[in-house]
Image (tube, helix red, strand yellow):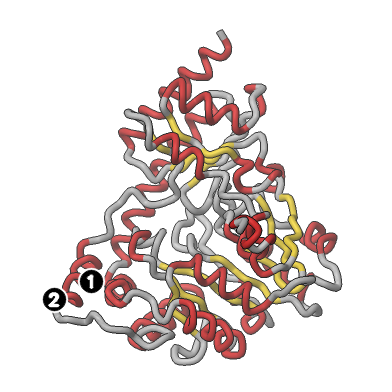
Amino acid sequence: MNMSDMIVPGVKAVPFSGIRKYFDLVNEMQGVISLGIGEPDFVTPWNIREAGIYSLEKGYTHYSSNAGYIELRNEIANYQSRRYGLSYDAREEILVTVGGSEAIDIALRSLVKEGDEVIIPEPSFVAYKGCTAFTGAKSVIVELKAEDDFRLKPEMLKAAITDRTKVLVIPFPNNPTGAIMEKSDLQAVADVIMDKDIIVISDEIYSELTYGAEHVSIASLKGMRDRTIVISGFSKAFAMTGWRIGYVCGSKIIIDQMKKIHQYAIMCSPTTAQFAAIEALKNSADDVSSMVREYNRRRRLMLSRLNSMGLSCFEPQGAFYTFPCIKSTGLSSDEFCEKLLMDEKVLMIPGNAFGECGEGFVRATYANSMENLLEALNRIERFLQKMKA
């Protein structure tokens, strides 16, 4: 038996993440400063960890309901209301998932099939295109441009829509660019799709991490609530990546179908993480604010130094990434990252790992200590100087 022939062709055709090989290389090297991993460098705040520990001490180690503990869903509903002006029924319109990634997967599996099209603005998180491929649907890529601050423009969206378009992904604040969409940007997008049968999947996992402009959800715009699936979670804002806890909010009609897939494939999210998440939403706003202030301090440093080195970088206003242009070096994104890693032991991620239009850029996270960032920036500057010599 040829084992390769047993694999579904659609799965075989999907490449591994372009980020993977760099992490494999780093695991074999000493002294590397990583600006590559997209997770907070902060430890989960103590009160959140304590809530998880206490739940174990009390013996709360059984399944929750499939949708998640109702206390957590109530807190999510309260949070969405007070932060973003969104109203959801905790019992019927909120589903707790294993991170935001599960939510993306089951949302797409509930909505699209072979022959359908999903519009994905890129550069963006690698999971959108991969999960779309697993459904048999087609990804239609809209290439975001640096001169537009990597925002989705209505004319670009119009050009991408066909009679097969079923879903539009709104990935803001954006990984890898740090771009945001303000209310006027979102309204322009909403105006394009308002009279069409298109569902929006709005990935808002970085919604708390903005610098200057407050996050606005497209679901809060008139007529958009019931045609939008809001995906969020605790990984980024609350420094809870390893807890694997996320959630999705939307119309009961869609949430019910997502819940079916979740029931059969997952059963329920980790219960220890659910108790920790309840505490996070109740009592950790100050911790989030403190982390955001520190990210902003690092963001300003990264932006200033990268631009001063000649790596032009637009100002990211969300998430914790910079996306400098490296075209002036004459190297491709892959060449730049591989050479920097080998010569100076600094890890960045090629921009084309997030879509072909990311070629000529690299992603550098500032979710690292100020000490490490300063050293990494000095190494990058030395690397660029040696290239010019």
Number of residues whose C-alpha sits closer than 10 Å to that of mark 1, classed few (under 14), some (14–19) or many (20 or more): many
Query: In which quadrant of the rendered view does residue 171 lie?
Result: bottom right
- Is any part of residue 3 visible from this angle? yes
Going 46% across and 49% down the picture, which residue do you hit?
Answer: 320
Q: Position of residue 54 (x, y in %)?
A: 16, 74
The residue that label 2 is drawn on is 57
**Cβ atoms at labels 2 and 1 below 8 Å apart:** no
* Element on which disc 1 rests: helix
Going 42% across and 42% down the picture, which residue do you hit?
Answer: 366
Q: How many marks?
A: 2
Which numbered tag is attached to residue 251?
none
Classify the position of the N terminus by image quarter: bottom right
Vertical relation: 18 (above or below) 251? above
Vertical relation: 310 (above or below) 275? above
Going 59% across and 76% down the picture, which residue do you hit?
Answer: 229
Report the side of 85 relative to 277 (left or right).
right
Query: In which quadrant of the rendered view does residue 14 lie?
Result: bottom right
- Choose the circle earlier in sequence order: 2 or 1: 1
- Amino acid carrying mark 1 in the image: Gly
Q: Position of residue 348 (x, y in %)?
A: 49, 36
Closest to the observer: 44 or 132? 132
Q: Position of residue 57 (x, y in %)?
A: 13, 76
**Residue at the extreme front of the image, as rendered:** 1
Which numbered tag is attached to residue 52?
1
Query: In which quadrant of the rendered view does residue 137 lie?
Result: bottom right
From the image, state whether disc 2 or disc 1 is nearer to you: 2
Closest to the observer: 313 or 98? 98
Vertical relation: 321 (above or below) 64? above
* Element on which disc 2 rests: helix
- Amino acid carrying mark 2 in the image: Glu
Measure the C-alpha gap from mark 2 to mark 1.
9 Å
Classify the position of the C terminus by image quarter: top right
